[in-house]
Amino acid sequence: MSGNLLDQLREFTVVVADTGDLQAIKRFAPKDATTNPSLIATASQMPEYRGIVDETLLQAKQDAGSGASDKEVVSLAFSRLSVSFGQQILDIVPGRVSVQADPRFSYDMESTIQQSRFLMSEFEKAGADRDRIMIKIASTWEGIEAAKILEAEDIQCNLTLLFGIHQAIPCADAGVTIISPYVGRILDWYVKNTGKEYHGADDPGVQSVTRIYNYYKKFGYETEVMGASFRTMSELVELAGCDLLTISPKYLNELEATSGELTRKLDPAKAAAMDIEKMTIDKATFDKMHTENRMANEKLAEGIKGFSKSLESLEGFLGKRLAELEGGAKVGEAALSIFEAYDLDEDGFITREEWLGLDSVFDALDIDGDGKITPAEMSAGLGATLQLMSA
């Protein structure tokens, strides 16, 4: 096989465009898409979406009742905004939209289940088909257990913040629809903590996803593996054949512009013939393996913290907007609240490690390409940051 690498990759991998750019979504035709609190926050504060926010807040205020607190109104409004923006995505992509469960429930199975059921019911009230909605849940033990129950109720789940085989195996045993291991973020951790350079098949992110893929195919699991967060073209080449790969426009363009022969590296037939030991992972084993895997331990905790802070930033904005609606004030600026949500160490700039949104969005906001986003860059870039991002 020859031609450009993107066309060849599509022959054995579902390519998902990792972008919030509507034109890129239309050009590269991603299968699935998703929302997250930070991008909803950005969109919510843009003039063209202000009407959706206002209508959602006022309706939530009415539905919550006169005795409801502002916090309860804001919580209801956030869930409904996720649905509203999710519905817009469904009008663009042919596949599924992922909506994030509250990351603050990551260690609370029952609350995750209840909120996921509520989100699904809201989508169905809006006319969406259940098979086009996925709930994004962090890959904690409690999140995986929640997903097991939800999948049995025909609520599809996308398990995110996944950094190791000890998370992946319970996800497959639970029958989740998709897992999203972060290739580039695993690499980032190893580069930072070892000082080494990694290339090709030696990349620890590539190795992690390859191990998970082969394990799934060896034992016939239906859970799909969607590699995400790439730092180099080499990572994409090494994972050719993965069920799905979510790729930024930068690398989609590079793949499309590169001619040559692409070799399939991940293959279910080859995996089925491998000598792989089947593992049983209960909670005690999960906890032990997670504690021993410092990379996964740190990245999972970091991810939950970042997602939670983003949601709190959005809730803060919605609370202020509710007061503004009742008092007649104008909407405030978006840049400061979004910036504070990601500046985890409060040192005045956002590094790639702190950034927990799309890598493509980080690249767009990092105007001078120095690996840091300043408040000025955030403010300048918000106008190009839309409410959509591909899963």
Image: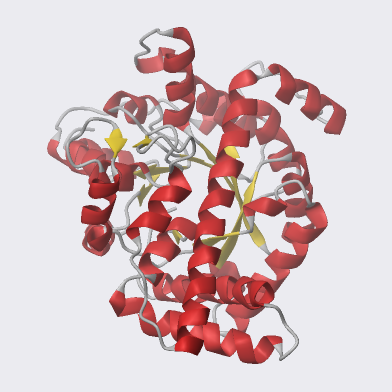
Residue placed most toward the observer, 11 or 71: 71
Q: Is residue 258 left or right of residue 120?
A: left
Q: Is residue 245 left or right of residue 159?
A: left
Q: Is residue 213 left or right of residue 241?
A: right
Residue placed most toward the observer, 122 or 72: 72
* Snapshot quadrant of residue 52: bottom left
Asked if residue 36 can be seen in this view, the reply is: no
Residue placed most toward the observer, 133 or 377: 377
Please state the horizontal and vertical placement of residue 214, each as a whole percent of the image: 57, 27
Asked if residue 288 can be seen in this view, the reply is: yes
Please state the horizontal and vertical placement of residue 278, each as a whole percent of the image: 75, 24
- Identify which residue is drawn at 64% across, 77% down: 70
- Identify which residue is drawn at 49% across, 13% down: 193
Residue placed most toward the observer, 119 or 106: 106
How is the protein colored in the picture?
A: secondary structure
Q: Is residue 23 left or right of residue 131?
A: left
Please state the horizontal and vertical placement of residue 86, each as a whole percent of the image: 47, 70
Q: Could you tell me how many numbered marks the image carries?
A: 0
* Snapshot quadrant of residue 71: bottom right
Please state the horizontal and vertical placement of residue 49, each as a whole percent of the image: 35, 77
Above or below residue 166? Residue 121 is below
Above or below residue 165? Residue 48 is below
